[in-house]
Amino acid sequence: MGRKALGKGLDALIPDLGRATISGQATIVDVEIDEISENPYQPRTRMSESSLEDLRQSISEKGILQPVIVRRKAGRYELVAGERRLRAAKLANLRSVPAVVRQVSDSEALEIALVENIQREDLNPIDEARGYRELIKRFKLTQEQLAKKLGRDRSTIANSLRLFNLADEVKRGLEEGKITAGHARALLGLDDVKQATSIYRTILHRGLSVRQVEGMVRQRLRPKGVRKADNQRPDPEIGRIEQQLMRKLGTRVKIIGHGGHGKIEIEFYSTDDLSRIIDAIR
């Protein structure tokens, strides 16, 4: 796993992990696996068995290329970052792993663990959102401050946190990979939890695409009793532009027009969300 995969945030916290010495303060040593306790701040709730197996095979063939990070605690070592590598090393029946021993506080250990996990590509969207929320809560950060720390757009953070507004059943489906983040964002357009859950079950039953779900959500949002005059069908070009704006702004957008004039309605759900949308428009 190269340093690029770690992202700006973790690089800032743990510079030059590939070297034997880190900022002149820590050295890579071999640590017995049995002496390493689990990380109590691990935000990841699920790990892909196939992914772990791939990593196990790689470790068996090439060894561990990236050391784990540990700290001394209560006469043992406590894992700070590198849980997948440690688990895969156990599966490969290794007795020890290369480790960087850092003297970090509980807060620093939490931040390193969260940032490493958040910046992994295979982290499921709910665990990613959980990590963002924990960082914001623990370190009293704004979404903007967190985005800068992680080298990401604030809209990414805001859209991720909105996933907590989903019904529990839908969140479980997203965690388990039954639906994508695109499906989930489309369902967020509905305030009615029962309607959103109903569409979620339809996605599972019929294998709907994100675009199909977006269409279903638009239909549910159409005011009752409103009919198109003279059987007029919705303009597909307007619908395409609405979808482009929704993807760009990360929220529900509706274009209402007739006879060459009209209005654009853009929804927001908090002052932070409004600021994010204004930034995106600018």
Image (cartoon, grey):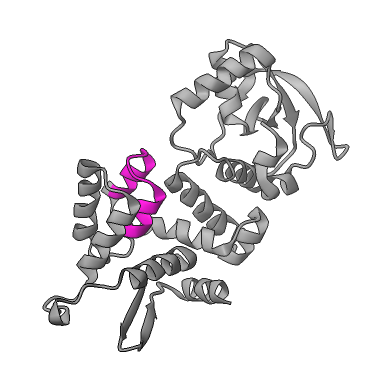
5 w.r.t. 274: above or below: above
Quadrant of the rendering where the N terminus is positioned: top right
> In front here: 266 or 227?
227
Quadrant of the rendering where the C terminus is positioned: bottom right
Residue at position x 51%, y 19% in the image = 53
Q: Is residue 102 visible?
A: yes
175 w.r.t. 95: above or below: below
Count of labels shown? 0
- Point out the stretch of residues depicted in magenta: 170-187
User: Is residue 265 shown left or right of residue 280?
Assistant: left
Residue at position x 51%, y 23% in the image = 52
> In front here: 101 or 60?
60
Residue at position x 62%, y 31% in the image = 82
Whole-percent x and y of residue 38? Answer: 55, 29
Q: Is residue 142 visible?
A: no
6 w.r.t. 56: above or below: below
Residue at position x 60%, y 66% in the image = 144
